[in-house]
Amino acid sequence: MPNKARLVIIGAGIAGCSAAYHLAQLGWRDIVVVEQGPLFATGGSTSHAPGGLSLISSSRMLTDFASYGVPLYARLAVDGRPGATLVGGLEVARSEARWAELKRRAGWGKSYGVEAHLLEPREVRQLVPVLDEHQILGGLFSPGAGIGAPVVIAQAMAQAAIDLGAATFQPHTTVTGIERDGRRVTAVVTDQGRIETDLVLLCAGIWGPLVGRLAGIVVPLMPMEHQYVKVGPIPELAAFGREIAMPIVRVHDHLMYCRMHGDQWGMGNYNHVPLPVEPEHIRPHGHPDDEPSKNAFTPEHFAEPFNQLAEVFPMVRGRPITESFNGMFSFTTDGMPILGPHPEVDGLWLAEAIWITHGGGAGRAVAQWMDSGVPPLDLREADVSRFHRHALTPGYIRARGHETYRNTHLIIHPAEPMARPRGIRRTPFYERYQEQQAFFIEMGGWERAAWCEANAGLAEPDLPARTGWAAQFWSPVQAAEHLRTREAAALFDMSTFTKIEVEGPDALALMQWVFTNQMDVPPGRVVYTLLLDFNGGMRSDMTVSRLTADRFRILSGAGAGPRDLAWLRRQAQARGFQVTIRDVSSAYGAIGLWGPRARAVLAAATEDDVSNAAFPYYTARELTIGAAQVYALRVSYVGELGWEIYVPPDTARHVWDALWRAGRPLGLIAAGSGAMDSLRIEKGYRRLGFDLDANYTPFEAGMEHTLRWKKGDFIGREALLRLKDQPLARRLTCLTLDRPGDVVLGREPVLEGSRAVGFVSSANTGYSVGQHVAYAYLPPELAQPGQKLAIEYFGQRLPATVAAEPLFDPDGARLRA
Ligand code: FAD
């Protein structure tokens, strides 16, 4: 075994082999892949995965991974055995709710460029003659999907890397230590010797948490058991005379999927209680079957699912089980993979919790990221830097593992809050919102009010009420809160935002380097800015106040915060800037006080001068409210006059109460995040992670106003200069729905005729403008106001028209009032 390597990959499952393959293609050499088991049926999850390859997902990132990887697998082979057989994927519905959901999924297919067709039961039967079509309402068929042979895929990829002279694979080699010199990785220690390296890629699957500990990090995933069973022999299947002659079939209503294995019928079953396995309890290699990621079958969890299977596939009745096991694989806290450079250990990368379906795309993404320093697509959903502290605790990882397992085939509403665990982080205003009978959702561990039932009875807009799907996790009270904000004023709890302080002699230099806007402003000024990646893609948007010459406070979203923080630290370290970067999120509560009467409310609660002259738009300063010192920013995310008020938790409620007492006679209410989103959309403010992400540039997003070319170099500047004078491929565009009462929620395809030309990035009702609003990236020729298009919603075409934006207060007069 080599004692030195450019890169050590730990684990030769699909993740490790795909990463090695793609790095080899990029010209990397001197890669050592260490594997504790044999090659290539290593005993990990890849060894016994049945290989269902489906393409459609609500996540564009996962769909991109699959759309690249699945056709690639079909081109790979070992000894004539193909990596994948593209027989298509079929999803069937046994309930009305599921049938509607399949229409929604068909829409995602169109949004993300995956061919898929809704089928009548008899058409389903033509594809899968062993299915009883009387048991289903219909199906969704994607011809590009199929069934993979995971070990073949892994072996073929590994062989290609070996053939290129890029990698060696070391079987029966267990990693027992990862050495570090301070933050940096220096070597991987195995039971076969030590390999010096400053680059490690962790692809250890369900063992990830154990191997992570060797490097001093938490890998937040939970191994969970999942049942797989084969029954047979079945003459109806034997008649095909082939190993695979039918699409993989997902019966989501019963949380199961099925595939052919020659004359056997295989079934994967999620319809059982979550069966977690603590990583330290995974059996070591050396067991007779040498498959440590398989546990004994638990027949008590299979009786009911087998009856359900027999209803849809009567041929299985009375057939014996020929193979059965509880296989393990990784479940993360949000159901997404874990990719990228670890924020605290230099040289340590992760490619964990990756399904077979996504292995090709995820392996390529991580390889390109390692190679160029920039991920090739927006990977925020998978970024290893995305986890808040609480999400790295054992109890949370366990609890979320259970939930994400349960959710695997469930219908999840886009606005549905996480069920468990809840109540981890409470803002100083939590009790005040409870008094207002708030409906709370979860965001970054925080409890956040979506609306307050106490506001029921306030005036609502004259719009048709939402019904059905669109009315779930929504309330007409949101509309009432929206209107009251526009007419009088409202308090919003902004405490959940991530607050970061940057201080030191190089603070300004760091700000200028990472942000697109001019950050060299006098203390007391506030700047709204973008944060780009080196390729010009939009990582984040933030509001930054300059507190003193060498101290800045940055506000970023609750979800984006940890990733932003990691990025700032990495850039500061890379350039050797002398700065201290601190997460001060919990050190301040924050109140948004917004609305035309916001000044009157504030003036009644403070003796300081808050006139426009004394406290202009985009400035910040200290105020005294009651007996408390606060730091107030004259900014607004809702397009109204007002302030964000930052206050330490000890005096936060005192300040809230002072504003409340001052404001109630003026019509002040407490409002939630639902109204905040509807207010921002009609004002044309972009939503991070929805309208703004790294797949797009500021030009495409209409964010040129945040770019300051003359201030000097900043991350992404060079890339943007190359794009500056080129025609845009697409442009973020505002659409309004033509018919009152029509509603879309996001990710639906935008159609010109029958052709999908984009998808909805974010949507909500603009209650003040009386229209339902959707944003989408569209080809520039279609982004012209007045252009007639349609949005597909559960299979229906909803007519929509491109509108000039912003729809509300285009001159910003209300903000500057
Ligand atoms: P693994 O394949 O487990 O590879 C990790 C490797 O790291 C192992 O080989 C292990 O031996 C090695 N390793 C660990 N620790 C060390 C160490 N200290 N030193 C050296 N080596 C080490 N996915 C789909 O897309 N479609 C499906 O239909 C599907 N069905 C599934 C059904 C079942 C029953 C199961 C169990 C999984 C299924 N999956 C499916 C999920 C999929 O199998 C996994 O997500 C995937 O195989 C994970 O690949 P990996 O490379 O991350 O992990």
Image (cartoon, rainbow, N blue to C red):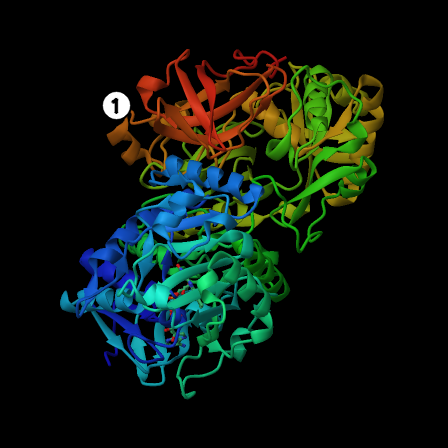
Residues 41 and 222: in front is 41
The correct choice, above or below, for 137 with respect to 212 in the image is: above
Residue annotated with mark 1 = 727
Taking depth in this image into account, of 593 and 398 the one nearest to the observer is 398
- List x then y, in percent, for residue 50: 38, 65
* 296 sits left or right of 274 in the view: left
The answer to which quarter of the image holds residue 667 is top right
Asked if residue 293 shows in the view, the reply is no
Q: Is residue 150 left or right of residue 706?
A: left
Residue 435 found in image quarter? top right
- Residue at image x 81%, y 31%? 454
Q: Quadrant of ligand 1?
A: bottom left
Within 10 Å of disc 1 (Cα), the crowding (few <14, some 14-19, many 20+) is few
- Residue 589 location (% of width, % of height): 70, 40
Quadrant showing the C terminus: top right
Question: Which amino acid, mark 1?
Answer: Pro
Above or below: residue 677 compared with residue 238: above
Q: Quadrant of the N terminus?
A: bottom left
Q: Nearer the viewer, residue 643 or 65?
A: 65
Asked if residue 209 shows in the view, the reply is: yes
Q: Position of residue 537 (x, y in %)?
A: 36, 37
Give the residue displayed 69% in from the left and 50% down from the top: 425
Q: Considering only vertical position in the picture, is 49 above or below 116? A: below
